[in-house]
Image (spheres, rainbow, N blue to C red):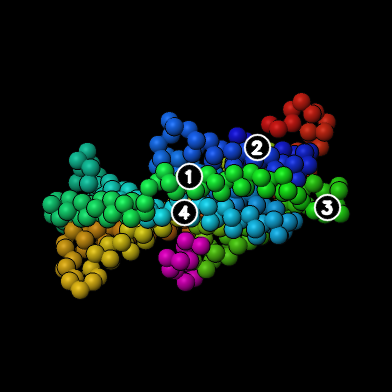
Amino acid sequence: MRFEVTPAQPAGAELRRIGAALVEHAIAQVDDPGVPSDAAVHETRKAMKKLRGLLRLVRNAAPDLYKAENRAFRDAAAQLAVVRDADVAVETFDRVLARAGNSPAKSARHQADTGASRLHADAEPLELASLRAALYAYRSEAHAGAGDADSRLAQFRARMLEARERLAGWELPDTGRERDAFAPFGPGLQKTYRRGRKAMARAYRMPSVEAFHEWRKRTKYLRYHLRLLRLAWPEQLKTQGAAVKKLQTLLGEDHDLAVLEELLATFHTGDTVPAETGAERALRAEMLRQRDLLRRRARLLGELVYAERPKAFRRRIAAYWRQAERAAEADPESAGG
């Protein structure tokens, strides 16, 4: 499906078209016997994120619609995300070790040249293997405690069938500005951009897991908005969108490190608290090094992504959109990129 709004088409009709395609895609993932349950969960959660991004774009134009449907799709996704942190912790552990230069293919000289820590040298291999086994055991317990994935997907499917029935009522009110077809999108776009800009400043002013996670969420929605409006100027917005996606990846990996760190802390709680191993201490030091690098890279890229003032950003995208509308009206066969 095209996750793009088409210039010169009624905004309300485009909202319903994209919303319906995402809901149908989610249902199809559950219904397809060839799609494993874990893959279905992954794909349906992505569809829910896109739906919420779509609704955020028109939130100012249709606040009641946004509040009701955003809540519905958020809750639907939540029932599928119950074991996400356990999965992320294992994946992040492997990624940290790989980036620390633990691959046999990497020489000690290469590790030194890239500034990688001496995690492998400082941690006993058996201790690392034991720690990894503990993370896998935790993930298995989390999956077992979450219940049957097929049952959760069936409940999710029922919610999507209800959403499909509601889609016909997705309407955008008359803005009173018939000549400005960008009006339903402009305020939502500007709000998302402004919040991301403020979240970035807050994250570096008062660094915390929560602050960087909030910035990550705002950046994710900016990426969705740029994808939705890409046909305003495909070449320009594709490039800008790629930069936002890279920023989102950096912030996502920063959050993954926080999830792993929090899980490691749970290994040392309770009545009997085991001593922290040398492997854990070395791993934490490496995680700190990688987090510092991720945040420095995110700052450099974020200053480019959020270089404009929010109003100027909105006006620029609006200018692209109006030009695309004029081009579509002049050459209808080329409309839609």
**CB contact under 8 Å: marks 3 and 1:** no
Q: Amino acid at mark 1?
A: Ala
Say left or right for 56 vs 269: right
The answer to whether residue 150 shows anywhere in this view is yes
Query: Is 275 located above or below residue 227 in the figure?
Result: below
Q: Which residues are magenta?
A: 204-214
Q: Which residue is mark 3?
A: 174
| CA gap, disc 1 and disc 4 | 11 Å
- Whether residues under marks 2 and 1 lie with C-beta atoms below 8 angstroms apart, the answer is no
Image coordinates of residue 215 in percent, x first then y, are 52, 60
Mark 4 touching mark 3, by CB under 8 A?
no
Q: Whole-percent x and y of residue 64?
A: 71, 60
Disc 4 secondary structure class: loop
Residue tagged 1: 154
Q: Is residue 320 visible?
A: no
User: In terms of secondary structure, where does tag 1 sit?
Assistant: helix
For disc 4, the neighbor class at 10 Å (few under 14, some 14 to 19, many from 20) is: some
Question: Which numbered tag is attached to residue 234?
Answer: 2
> Vertically, is 303 above or below 114?
below
Question: Tag 2, which secondary structure?
Answer: helix
Q: Amino acid at mark 3?
A: Asp
* Quarter containing the N terminus: top right
> Which residue has dot 4 on it?
79
Measured Cα–Cα span from mark 2 to mark 4: 35 Å
Indicate yes or no whether the magenta region holds residue 210.
yes
Find out whether the residues at labels 1 and 4 contact each other: C-beta distance under 8 Å.
Answer: no
What is the quadrant of residue 11 in the picture? top right
x%, y% of residue 5?
69, 41
- Mark 2 surroundings within 10 Å by alpha-carbon count, few (fewer than 14), some (14 through 19), many (20 or more): some
How far is the residue under mark 2 from the one under mark 1?
38 Å
